[in-house]
Amino acid sequence: MSAKQPLQVTAIPAFADNYLWLIHGGEHAVVVDPGDAAPVEATLASLNLTLDAILLTHHHADHAGGVEALLARRNIPVYGPARERIAGVSVPLSEGQSVALASLGLTLSVLDVPGHTAGHIAYVAAEQHWLFCGDTLFAGGCGRLFEGTPQQMTASLQKFAALPDDTAVYCAHEYTVSNLRFAVAAEPGNPQVTARLRDAQQRRARGESTVPSHIGIEKLTNPFLRYREPAVIAALKDAGRLDSPDPVAAFAALREWKNSF
């Protein structure tokens, strides 16, 4: 039975720096955030896979732009955030709900993680220790606050921080080197950040991906999970960007600093 095949997650590069995630086992697959249909179709064909469902985290075109073309060739469910209007979504989801993908023997729970967009969701495979977080959390960083508030984003990121440390973080962009360069500025005395940046640079020089990451290393090196740390607070004050003891104000100042870094 295909449901008993070991599950794999394959990265499908798209655009300049996106990753579309293909979860597959046996002859079946689901795709997370297919911003472009063409590379998805090519990967399905090369691996001889049948696409059974589409999972969306938010409405931005580089995540949802390929849905229409994928549906033109098949009749499959499209799961997406209940609080966002996305063409093609047939199963709207919010926190507390789950997705049961019978052909893969996979269950994903849903988290509401607003901040990058107002209705952004994430998918957690608890048994496999996988997180598909869209643009909320990145390796070494987090998404810009296009629609949400700092309060929302800090709450969303804390949901991720509460996951087991060995949870693989399948974020949607290859932003790691630039994120970690900022992390060095935000916490210059953290040797783990410096070491991680060096490793990421070496990987990229070899043409390798830097993702997935893991929750444990994010908690040790990602300034947007470390905005309460005294060293990060000190760096913000030294940069003239913070004059408040409020942690959310520190997060907001950190995000604004990164926007122009």
Image (tube, grey):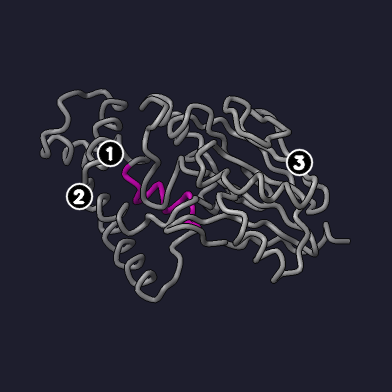
Which comes before the other along the chain, label 3 or label 2? 3
- Place residue 229 in its image quadrant: top left
Residue at the spot 19% in from the left edge and 51% down from the top edge: 188
Q: Assign a secondary structure to mark 2.
A: helix
Residue that numbered label 1 is attached to: 229
The residue type indicated by label 1 comes to Glu
The residue to which callout 2 is attached is 185
Kindly report the distance in space between the C-alpha atoms of the residues bearing marks 1 and 2: 14 Å
Quarter of the rendering containing residue 163: top right
Q: Badge 1, how many Cα within 10 Å: few under 14, some, many 20+?
A: few
Mark 1 and mark 3 lie on one chain; the one further toward the N terminus is: 3
The residue at the point 54 percent across, 54 percent down is 168
Q: Is residue 108 left or right of residue 260?
A: right
143 relative to 50 in the view: left or right: left
* Badge 2 amino acid: Ala
The residue segment tinted magenta is 212-223
The reply to whether the C-beta atoms of the residues labelled 1 and 3 are less than 8 Å apart is no
Q: Classify mark 1: helix, strand or loop.
A: loop
Residue drawn at point x = 30 percent, y = 34 percent: 228
Q: Which residue is mark 3?
A: 77
